[in-house]
Image (tube, rainbow, N blue to C red):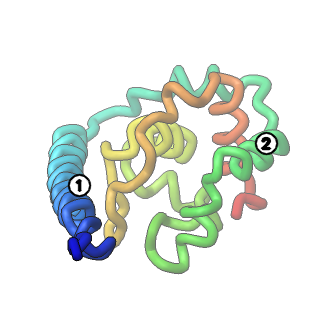
């Protein structure tokens, strides 16, 4: 009578390999996130001090003909509300509510519109105290000028939430 290896024992090497792969992947993710957070923090510190509003002309051009009602739809479409509405409760991102009033004093000498512009395209330039720099950094590639102008116009309205 020959004894065949049990199916349980023949799967053991597969489970060991999968466990090792899982541990290595988890370690890589932790290291990558830590390195990214450090780099983003350094970038934010490097651009922290401003003596003038470098975005004023660009923002004025974006706001010419901007459509705030379309901006409200884009905020939903791009998923901004996941962090700035629902996530604001859990301190993932600052809420949009009242941003038009707050933005103008958050990072002097930036105007409210310039602050929103910078926060969207260069989210690590300034991080609101109490929040982590977790905003996606690919909006310069994802947003057209029209979309960006419309979003800024919407966030400058009292209806932004």
- The quadrant holding residue 25 is bottom left
Q: Nearer the viewer, residue 141 or 111?
A: 141
Looking at the rendered image, the quarter that the C terminus falls into is bottom right
Identity of the residue drawn at 69% across and 49% down: 75
In this rendering, does residue 155 appear at all? Answer: yes
Instruction: Residue at 64%, 60% (x, y): give it.
Output: 81
Rendered residue at 21%/41% (across/down): 43
Marks counted in the figure total 2
Mark 1 or mark 2, whichever is nearer to me: 1
- Estimate the x, y position of residue 64 in percent, counting from the top left: 73, 24
Give the side of residue 25 with respect to residue 140, left or right: left
Mark carried by residue 68: 2
Res. 34 in view:
no
**Is label 1 in a helix, a strand or a loop?**
helix
Residue located 63% across and 23% down the image? 145
Give left or right: position of 21 versus 64: left
Percent x, y of residue 106: 42, 57
Q: Earlier in the sequence, mark 1 or mark 2?
A: 1
Dividing the picture into quadrants, the one containing residue 118 is top left
Q: Does dot 2 land on a helix, a strand or a loop?
A: helix
**Residue 49 on image: x %, y %:** 22, 42
> Quick one: which residue is furthest to the front in this view?
1
Q: CA distance from mark 1 to mark 2?
A: 43 Å
The crowd level at tag 1 (other Cα within 10 Å; few <14, some 14-19, many 20+) is: few
Task: Look at the picture and state if 75 lies above or below 83.
Answer: above
Q: In this orientation, which residue lies closer to the viewer: 72 or 4?
A: 4
In this picture, is 145 found above or below 7?
A: above
Please tell me the numbered disc located at residue 25: 1
């Amino acid at each position: 009578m020959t004894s065949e290896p049990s199916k349980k024992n023949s799967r053991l090497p597969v489970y060991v390999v999968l466990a090792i792969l899982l541990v290595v992947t988890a370690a890589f993710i932790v290291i990558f996130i830590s390195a990214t957070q450090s780099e983003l923090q350094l970038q934010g510190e490097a651009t922290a001090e401003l003596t003038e509003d470098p975005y004023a002309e660009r923002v004025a051009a974006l706001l010419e003909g901007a459509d705030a009602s379309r901006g409200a739809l884009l905020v939903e479409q791009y998923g901004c509300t996941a962090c700035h509405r629902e996530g604001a409760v859990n301190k993932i991102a600052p809420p949009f509510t009242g941003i038009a009033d707050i933005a103008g004093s958050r990072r002097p000498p930036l105007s409210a519109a310039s602050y929103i512009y910078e926060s969207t395209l260069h989210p690590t330039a300034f991080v609101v105290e109490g929040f982590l720099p977790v905003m996606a950094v690919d909006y310069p590639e994802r947003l057209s000028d029209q979309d960006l102008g419309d979003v800024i116009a919407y966030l400058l309205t009292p209806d932004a939430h």
